[in-house]
Image (tube, rainbow, N blue to C red):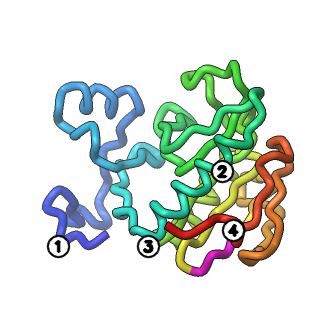
């Protein structure tokens, strides 16, 4: 994200200590109107991180993917879009899609009961496949897919460790993506998703 284009972002304190926030403090700032409720930010280790704007390829892929999964999903699972996923007291992310068992309340969502987290990368490809994937791994999210909207490829991350994922695989648009923990109804080929 270009700092010059967004007056709410600063790099003035580069190299200096920063004040860390908690999830509860950020929620209070949203409730008080200090942070707009529609502003796209994540809290990573106590620091607010503005998210890149979503491109048209990103949105088109997400619409088709969520539509397909909602039509084919078993009633034992929930498909949630851009839900706030609390990883700790000072970290939350907003995956593009998260699949979890029916009956798990959003406030009880944790890395241990999420069946699949999915990020759709457009302008955020390096961040999603690098720093953000490492973050998911460090909290124990068992499976992460990062779909590259422009290239129509997917990187599958499995076997989380504190240092990253122990297993990564790159798959093309015609390859079958099969989740390890979510039911087989969530398997798909990107080629099977129609363009918008």
Question: Quick one: label 4 or label 3, which is nearer the N terminus?
Answer: 3
Q: Helix or strand or loop: what does disc 3 sit on?
A: loop
Earlier residue among tags 1 and 2: 1
Name which of mark 4 and mark 2 comes first in the sequence: 2
Helix, strand or loop at disc 2?
Answer: helix
Q: Is residue 103 above or below residue 162?
A: above
Local crowd size for mark 1, using a 10 Å CA cut-off: few (<14), some (14–19), many (≥20): few
Mark on residue 123?
3
Query: Residue 1: image x %, image y %?
Result: 31, 69
Real-space Cα distance between discs 1 and 4? 36 Å
Mark 4, other Cα within 10 Å: few <14 / some 14–19 / many ≥20: many
Q: Is 161 part of what is drawn in magenta?
A: no
The residue that label 4 is drawn on is: 190
Q: Which residue is mark 1?
A: 4
Number of the front mark, 1 or 4: 4
Of 103 and 10, which appears nearest the observer? 103
């Amino acid at each position: 994200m270009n700092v010059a284009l967004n007056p709410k972002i600063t790099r003035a304190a580069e190299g200096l200590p920063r004040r860390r926030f908690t999830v509860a403090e950020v929620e209070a700032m949203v409730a008080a109107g200090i942070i707009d409720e529609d502003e796209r930010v994540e809290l990573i280790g106590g620091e607010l991180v503005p998210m890149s704007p979503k491109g048209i390829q990103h949105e088109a892929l997400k619409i088709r993917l969520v539509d397909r999964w909602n039509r084919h999903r078993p009633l034992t699972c929930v498909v949630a879009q851009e839900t706030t996923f609390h990883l700790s007291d000072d970290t939350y992310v907003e995956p593009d899609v998260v699949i979890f068992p029916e009956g798990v309340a959003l406030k009880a969502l944790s890395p241990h009961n999420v069946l699949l987290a999915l990020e759709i990368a457009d302008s955020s490809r390096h961040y999603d496949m690098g720093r953000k994937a490492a973050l998911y791994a460090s909290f124990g999210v068992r499976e992460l897919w990062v779909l590259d909207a422009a290239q129509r490829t997917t990187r599958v991350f499995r076997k989380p460790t504190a240092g990253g994922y122990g297993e990564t695989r790159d798959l093309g648009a015609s390859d079958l993506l099969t989740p390890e923990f979510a039911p087989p109804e969530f398997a798909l080929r990107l080629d099977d998703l129609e363009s918008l």
